Image (cartoon, coloured by chain):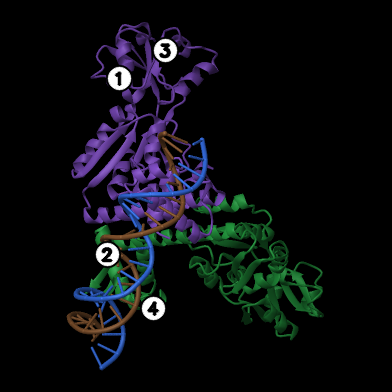
Chain colours: A green, B purple, C blue, D brown
Amino acid sequence: MKLQQLRYLVEVAKQGLNVSEAAEKLHTSQPGISKQIRLLEDELGVQIFIRNGKRVVDVTAPGREILRISERMLMQAQNLKRIGEEFVNVEGGSLTIATTHTQARYALPKPIKAFLARYPKVRLSIKQGSPTQISEMVVDGSADIAIATEGIDHYPELAMLDCYDWNRDVVVPSGHPLATLDHPISLAEIAAYPLITYDFAFTGRNKINRAFENVGLTPNVVLTAIDTDVIKTYVSLGLGVGIIAGMAFEPERDIGLVAVAAGHLFEPSTTRIGIRRDAYLRGYAFDFIELFAPHLSRQDVQDALLCEIGDAA
Amino acid sequence: MKLQQLRYLVEVAKQGLNVSEAAEKLHTSQPGISKQIRLLEDELGVQIFIRNGKRVVDVTAPGREILRISERMLMQAQNLKRIGEEFVNVEGGSLTIATTHTQARYALPKPIKAFLARYPKVRLSIKQGSPTQISEMVVDGSADIAIATEGIDHYPELAMLDCYDWNRDVVVPSGHPLATLDHPISLAEIAAYPLITYDFAFTGRNKINRAFENVGLTPNVVLTAIDTDVIKTYVSLGLGVGIIAGMAFEPERDIGLVAVAAGHLFEPSTTRIGIRRDAYLRGYAFDFIELFAPHLSRQDVQDALLCEIGDAA
DNA sequence: GTTTGTTACGGCTACCGTAAAGATC
DNA sequence: GATCTTTACGGTAGCCGTAACAAAC
């Protein structure tokens, strides 16, 4: 059994059981892949793929198990290489964070600035995407850490750690009737105006919907945006009332806008980080996490990696 | 990077950093091992072993990490082979249980009989040893399942599952004063006689000691045995009063002996099974566990394997 | 007919074992 | 001096790539 064979196997599965494409991805010949897979099947004594004549059409039951374990082994092989890099170049390296606009724009600048000061030689990169996209980036290894609020709960490969809770604000142009209320704002008052808020699947949007549903109101959402800046822009234009993450309101920058606390109206959301449970994280990655969420020490994170299903149960 | 290299690495570490012995164990030449390890070190870019001139004297910090991960990878490679065997020969195979005398003699016969009837083609073997020995058998892969009552808690590689609680009986020759009490037996009454019980490190022996200590009694233990049969033999000879596991008393066989329930005097003990968290268990292994501890379904066991640190916390 | 997987064959890498030399205790 | 590790070197297995063939859509 050779690691190469497992690599072939996993790549064929990943390419939808297409040996030729796998060969192309791995920059090798497809007869080589065919042969090595057959050799592995012979060695293990099981068919891994079901072939219809000369076409790979499915994975056998043992094949699924074998693929699962193979992936883990390859992951660990990658970890071995990372350990090498880590110790050769303690300070240098790279860290890729996958996150949503709101986090990147409002929550991350501060910890990232501190991180860059501490680790100037680390190549830090940020990838933006939807919660689903960023989760998958971490799952497939193209990012190290996912940071998001929604929809990253359901990947068994990922360990999730709570970072902080936050509430929502209503933003309106200054001078707007809602800006000068003498009492806490209510859902009914908000629903009286056209609404601008986050796209579905983003930043706790469904918690907003649920709040209105619970009191039998149907808000008139005139615009859904992916990022807060777009929301604020249209609120400035008088298109409607915005509902945004509290941390996304910056009084000194958001001239002409007023934020009204609405934490009492909507469930708070929790921003979490997600990391592959079997990934090897460089030392500075733990430091970054601690900069972002100071209560998460390296030990906490490693414990969570070891066993995080228990927390969910 | 090749699996073979990892195998060399791990074996050298296991043989106390002696390359020659590792070569012998692996039936290969030691120059080959030296070279492959150097090649791996070059590839990873880190020293794994610290060499004093030409002698391997220690493992570097990254080396320890690398060894840890390598062991896991090799374990999984072995799992791959097992999957093959499992599906080639669904009914056949082997299962090795490491356990103590008491379990082997009194708790296991019934489930093993049922197991053999269900899986006649499985080569079942039982290895007997002290709790420490059996734990290590499972850790190093020479047994699949450990069953014991004491001292198998502290191996992080092992997942532990509670099977059943049991209490102790006092055994005396029939006609003995303690055999005909009209009230529940007390510690003081027991301590009045010479005692015969289990060796330290076995079968909850320290719970027995603790019970006496708690009431300020110092029992006179005249004989410590590893197995219950020895205890019963000497009790029959009138050497003293025995304290044994309740399940180990068989009224129809133990002629001339009387058991007196003593569950109210000593903490109950819990018999557990231990399995390597990263081992691949054959289907019948799960069935065996369920035969032994009917409340442990396959799913329960697999969940515990996935994450069992959480249960301990 | 095109796409896709298998079989056949040759080159070449690199692994392994033997032999000898260098280091350490 | 004995043990242990590395270096040197030759044989060989087996991996990879090209080319031709066979099957499926």
Say what secondary structure mark 1 lies in: helix
Q: Going from the N terminus, do you reach mark 3 or mark 1 first?
A: 3
Judging by the rendered image, the residue that carries numbered circle 4 is A24
- Of tags 1 and 4, the one toward the viewer is 4
**Rendered location of residue B169, percent (x, y):** 37, 19
**Rendered location of residue C14, percent (x, y):** 38, 63
Q: Is residue A62 above or below residue B232?
A: below
Give the quarter of the image for residue A166. bottom right
Circle 1 Cα neighbour tier, 10 Å, few/some/many (<14 / 14–19 / ≥20): some
Question: Which part of the image, by quadrant, shows the N terminus of chain A?
Answer: bottom left
- Of tags 1 and 2, the one toward the viewer is 2
Judging by the rendered image, the residue that carries numbered circle 2 is A39
Measured in 3D between alpha carbons, the distance from the residue under mark 1 to the one under mark 4, in whole angstroms, is 68 Å
Answer yes or no: do the residues labelled 2 and 4 have beta carbons within 8 Å? no
Judging by the rendered image, the residue that carries numbered circle 3 is B183
Q: Chain of mark 4?
A: A
Check disc 2 and give the amino acid type.
Leu
Say what secondary structure mark 3 lies in: loop
Left or right of residue B108: residue B301: right
Q: Nearer the viewer, residue A211 or B227?
A: B227
Check disc 3 and give the amino acid type.
His
Q: Chain of mark 2?
A: A
Measured in 3D between alpha carbons, the distance from the residue under mark 3 to the one under mark 4, in whole angstroms, is 83 Å
Say what secondary structure mark 4 lies in: helix
Q: Going from the N terminus, do you reach mark 2 or mark 4 first?
A: 4
Circle 4 Cα neighbour tier, 10 Å, few/some/many (<14 / 14–19 / ≥20): few
Judging by the rendered image, the residue that carries numbered circle 1 is B229
Measured in 3D between alpha carbons, the distance from the residue under mark 3 to the one under mark 2, in whole angstroms, is 72 Å
